[in-house]
Image: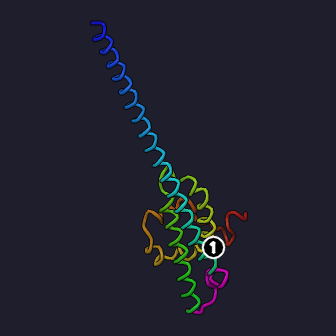
């Protein structure tokens, strides 16, 4: 009878070992899942950054090749105004893409990198953006974001408020 009790104890020990192994396996699977999600998000963030960087580089190259496109046209030449308008639309469309990609609580690093670019391009091309016919080319949420986050400097007697 002692051999039967001993066999039952061995079976009980192996059952406990099986339960522990199953628990450790489950913990390993959950850990692997969390690592996979973290790795995927990191890769996605890097891809977003690289894609935005490439697009912005192309816009900067156009601006270097054609510096007259970097300022709101002062000349009454309709061809130059049309060229500027096309370039400004490309820039603002890129800025809207940045805005879209930077939404969400986990996109702080993208915002830290790209929101200064939005500010710089806003300073260069805000005159174009403020034309009524151009604002309709963008989502209302984006227009609201620009108006709230990057308000136009107020002008007093021809002098910008920041120069007072």
* Along the line of sight, the residue nearer the viewer: 154 or 152: 152
**Which residues are the magenta region?**
62-78
- Quadrant holding the N terminus: top left
Q: Residue 47, percent across and down?
A: 53, 62
Q: Residue at x 52, y 78 (%)?
A: 89
Q: Of helix, strand and loop, which one carries label 1?
A: helix
* 22 horizontally vs 160: left or right: left
- What residue is pinned by disc 1? 124
Q: Residue 8, percent across and down?
A: 30, 15
* 161 horizontally vs 34: left or right: right
User: Is residue 35 one of those drawn in magenta?
Assistant: no
User: Is residue 69 one of those drawn in magenta?
Assistant: yes
- Quadrant holding the C terminus: bottom right
Q: Residue furthest top?
A: 1
Q: Residue at x 64, y 79 (%)?
A: 61
* Along the line of sight, the residue nearer the viewer: 38 or 150: 38
Where is 144 relative to 109, above or below? below
Q: Residues within 10 Å of mark 1 (few under 14, many from 20)?
A: some
Name the quadrant containing residue 15. top left
């Amino acid at each position: 009878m002692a051999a039967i009790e001993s066999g039952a104890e061995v079976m009980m020990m192996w059952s406990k070992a099986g339960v522990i192994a199953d628990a450790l396996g489950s913990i390993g699977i959950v850990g692997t899942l969390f690592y996979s999600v973290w790795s995927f998000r990191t890769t996605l963030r890097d891809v977003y950054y690289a894609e935005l960087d490439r697009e912005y580089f192309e816009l900067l190259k156009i601006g270097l090749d054609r510096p007259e496109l970097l300022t709101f046209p002062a000349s009454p030449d309709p061809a130059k105004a049309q060229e500027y308008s096309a370039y400004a639309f490309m820039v603002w469309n890129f800025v809207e893409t940045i805005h879209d990609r930077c939404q969400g609580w986990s996109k702080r690093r993208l915002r830290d990198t790209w929101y200064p670019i939005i500010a710089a391009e806003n300073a260069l091309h805000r005159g174009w953006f403020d034309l009524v016919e151009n604002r309709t080319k963008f989502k209302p949420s984006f227009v609201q974001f620009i108006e709230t986050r990057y308000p136009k400097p107020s002008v007093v007697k021809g002098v910008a408020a920041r120069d007072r």
